[in-house]
Each structure stands twice: as C-alpha cells, then as structure tokens.
Image (cartoon, coloured by chain):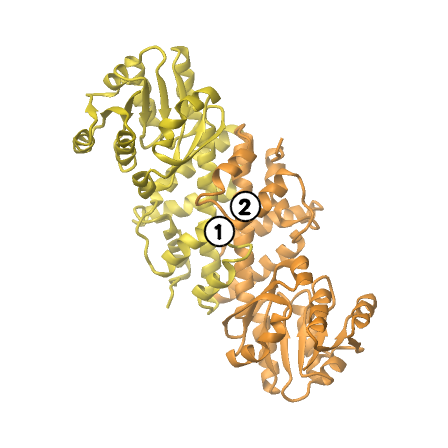
Chain colours: A orange, B yellow
Amino acid sequence: MKIGFIGLGIMGKPMSKNLLKAGYSLVVTDFNQDAVKDVVAAGAVAAANSKEVAAQVDVVITMLPNSPHVKSAVLGENGVLEGAKPGLVLIDMSSIAPLASREIYTELEKQGIEMLDAPVSGGEPKAIDGTLSVMVGGKKEVFDKYYDVMKAMAGSVVYTGDIGAGNVTKLANQVIVALNIAAMSEALMLATKAGVNPELVYQAIRGGLAGSTVLDAKAPMVLDRNFKPGFRIDLHIKDLANALDTSHGVGAYLPLTASVMEMMQALKIAGDGQLDHSALARYYERLANTEITRD
Amino acid sequence: MKIGFIGLGIMGKPMSKNLLKAGYSLVVTDFNQDAVKDVVAAGAVAAANSKEVAAQVDVVITMLPNSPHVKSAVLGENGVLEGAKPGLVLIDMSSIAPLASREIYTELEKQGIEMLDAPVSGGEPKAIDGTLSVMVGGKKEVFDKYYDVMKAMAGSVVYTGDIGAGNVTKLANQVIVALNIAAMSEALMLATKAGVNPELVYQAIRGGLAGSTVLDAKAPMVLDRNFKPGFRIDLHIKDLANALDTSHGVGAYLPLTASVMEMMQALKIAGDGQLDHSALARYYERLANTEITRD
C-alpha cells in the first residue's frame, strides 16, 4: 500500500518514520524542507505539494496544527482533493474541531472519497516509540480496512463512532486533563498557604478517590518547579478553544473549561505559553504570591 | 487503654465497633439512644454526655458532623474539657475546618490536653471494613503513641504535619474529587451533545492522561443513572465550604472550587442533596436538557 503523509512536524516526522519501518511506501510533503530531507533519507519520496502527494497514493495521512491547515491542505489550491484518484481515503490524524472534520468529509464524500478523523494523544515521546493512542471516527468498514496502518504508529487504535467522533473524544480527553490539572493546583495551593507540605498532601491522597494519572504525572513536576513540556499551554489553549466552539455548536455548556482556558490565556500573555500545561499552577501561584514547592 | 467515643452516626458506629473488636474498652455517648444501645450491645459502656465520657478514659475520639458540633462537644457545657483528667488526649476524626481544629487545640493546650485532628476518607463501607484512610495532624510523638488506636479502624494512617494538617489534607482531597467529577461531567456532556456515545469516550480515554479514580468510580454511575450514595452532595458542600473558608483565611484563591460549590448548591436547592456527588452531572444535564446515558 502506498501512503501519502502531509505534515512532518514534531509529531508527523516520527509517525511517518514508523510507517517506513513497518514497510509502507511513503510520499511526503511539508513546507519545512529540512523535515522533508530527513524523512526522505529514511526512505520516503518527496512531492511538491498535497495535490502531487494525493495523485501518487491510495491513502493520505494529514498531521497538521489545526482546522484551517487541514482544510487548506485538503480542499485548497494544490490540495488533496485536486490530486485525488477515485477511491482515495483520507486519514486526518490532526487534532482539529469535530465540526471541521464533518465539513471536510461532506466535500470529500461528493467526490467519492472516504475519510477517518483519527487524532492522537501521547505527545512526541509516544510518537517516536510508536505507542500513541488513536481515537477514530468514520465508517466502521473504513476503520477496519486501515486499522493496520494506524496501528503501525500506535499502541492503541479505538473506534469511537461516525466522522468527527475521533476529535470529539480527543476534546473530551483534553477537557478532563485541563480540569484535573486545575484541581491539583487548587488543592496544592490550599495546602501550601495553610502551612502544610504539599508533597505530604500529594502522598497522602494519591491512593484514594482523588488519585489520577494527572496527579501522578504533574504534581511532581510542580513540586520540582520543572515545567519542561510535555504538552504546551499554547496547544492546550487550541484544544480547549475547539472544545468550546464545538460545545456551543451542539448545545453543551462547559463553564469550568471556559474558566481554565482563560487562566491558560493569562499565562500565555504573561509569556508562559511554551511551558508544560502543569504550569497552570502558576496562575494560582501568581494570585497567591506563593510557589507550590517540595521544600 | 480505655477509649471514649463521641458520635455514633453512619461513620462513628462502625468505627467504634472496630475498636471493640480490636479489644479496646469503650465509653460512648450520642444523642441517638438507638445507636448507643447498638454499640453497648457490642460491648461498650454508655455515658450521659461528653463530660462523663472524658472523666472515665485516657483518650477521647470525636466523630461529629462539623466544626460547631466538635467545639460544643469538646469546649461546651458538659463537654470533654469539663470532664478531662490531666494527660487526656483528644483524637478528633470529624471532617471540620482546619482553623477550628487549631482553635480547639489552643483551648485544650492551656489545660495540658493534647489533640490530633484525624479526618477520614472512604465512607461507610470502609468504616465497616476498617479500611478507612486517616490523615493526621498534631505532634508527631502523639501520633506515634496513638497510631495503633487509629489503625484499628483504618487501612492507612498518614502523618501530614502540625494540628490542622489532617483537615487541610482532607479538604485538598475533597477539592480534587469535586473538580474531577466536574471535569468528567463536562467531557461526557460534550460527547453526548456532539452525538458520540459517552460510554465509548469513557472507554477510549480512561487508560490515558485523562484517567482517574473518579472517572472509573463515577462515570459508570452516571451512565447507569445510579446516584445512590456513596458520598452525598450535602456533605461535599460542607467540605467545600470549609475549603473556601480556610483558603480565604490563609490567602489561597480557589475559583473553580467556588464554582463547583455553587453548582452543588443549585442541585441541593433542586432537591438532589441526598444523591451521590456524581449527580453533579445533573447540573450540566439540566443546562443542556439532555441526559448522559449508556444508551
């Protein structure tokens, strides 16, 4: 099977290399020519643009920053749709708004092109290891046919429903992660200001109902003052903005998600957008003029 | 060692029985005479009030609803302080405001009486099984001396710092639990309104960074429409009110905790105060006029 890969960024580059390792032929494109050269050195063929990628392959994978980039690469000038052969399938692995996934699919469907929305979680380390989690929306038979392609980049590939369901699932994930980080921040700030060692509080509560993957992954980072990403506040703002846009479109109301997005915006404006999202704790620290530390 | 036990409610009754099973002699009191008879039948001796309990024992355990009840039972008329022999120790296992713990200790210390604040988590089932988690504040040597007494009712007994630290830790725990339930509710409502099966979303994300003990314990309850407590909204409101009072007293600001407390208040006013705290999801359901269900 010949695969096209559009978008060789922090995530796309290692993902495309894992497809090469799994024995797939790859045609790739990106504005960043250094990234293209790197993946070509690993065995891929370069194409000038998305249209030329699509013309040479059976399935196109996109891994781009957000909804407008995917719309442009697929539906725009020199895009996938212009070059697509009949029967081409698009697997969009970008994290974008579910409504955008549905809009793109509506256009593709008219031309007989199937699509899966298949965003990932796990970040750069899991992209390199090929152990990402993929959440997939689209027709079940299309999912089944391309399961092995996605599995070559992932530890788990889960079907969650019709087109857009993959991105809805990803956004639900990001809402929980953001609010669980805020929960941890409020709890540890309360402890700190009340004169109780936040490290002891973390250890005392982690085994009970307050326990979470966020608490175990992020409380030590805050206590150590280590905000190296991980997952950047900038990117989490993008996901929460998509969650709120989506929720308003479908009639769900997410007041706490909106509050946390505003906190993250405040941090971004203060210059912390490149820090790990656990730096949400710094919002509370600024308010209370106190650091949550191990000491 | 002779132990006094004041407060034989849903938690206190099984806790006192576990002390009897462990071989301790018990003197008990409660306004509810049925509860007193029940524990006397199990081997305890009844006393008319807290003063008479204190006069007969080496250590007094209190397990009462909130700060005013503990203050009254300890410092009030016919209270522990009036009956206390020199060297008596108070172990307050109620969940109360940490500042109240410190105020009570200040009065006791003047009379040479030591105190631990030792709130528990785990609810009625773990009180019955003797597997509660106990978070303890006070002098370390007092903690060490009475560790075995607390362990007779608990799976874990953790020292967290000076007097009040036990209740600070408990409040930190309750802040995280409340916000993690809200996080789950926002995520599953987003999925539901976007037309994606919330059960599939839960299964897809539970193994990743969004995973938590709350998600695994409470998402199935929401999906099954089973809001039998567990831990009641009424009681969680009490704990969050203590968290906010404490935070304002020490200069920490907990805006999301305040929001969730208001959501819980709205549910209480609507008649849902007796439901499990997972019924926080119903706040979102009312707003969106949609239930989060498995079907």
x and y, in percent, of residue B43 in the image: 20, 28
Q: Secondary structure at mark 2?
A: helix
> Which mark, residue B280?
none
Q: Secondary structure at mark 1?
A: loop
Residue B24, compared with residue A110, is above or below; it is above
User: Which of the 4 image quadrants contains residue A130?
Assistant: bottom right
Instruction: Tell me what residue is drawn at x 56 percent, y 35 percent.
Output: A199
Q: Disc count in the image?
A: 2
Residue under numbered circle 2: A215
Instruction: Tell me what residue is drawn at x 63 percent, y 49 percent.
Output: A277
Left or right side of B67 for B215: right
Instruction: Tell me what residue is drawn at x 37 percent, y 24 percent.
Output: B91
Amino acid type of the residue that numbered disc 1 sits on in the rendered structure: Ser
Left or right side of A183 for B238: left
Amino acid type of the residue that numbered disc 2 sits on in the rendered structure: Leu
Residue under numbered circle 1: B212
Q: Quadrant of the N terminus of chain A?
A: bottom right
x and y, in percent, of residue A48 in the image: 81, 77
Instruction: Tell me what residue is drawn at x 38 percent, y 51 percent.
Output: B278
What is the chain letter for disc 1?
Answer: B
x and y, in percent, of residue A290 in the image: 62, 32
Q: Is residue A167 visible?
A: yes
Discs 2, 1 touching: Cβ within 8 Å:
yes
Q: Judge the density around disc 1: few (<14), some (14-19), many (≥20) Cα neighbours within 10 Å.
A: many
What is the chain letter for disc 2?
Answer: A
How far apart are labels 2 and 1 at the CA level?
Answer: 9 Å
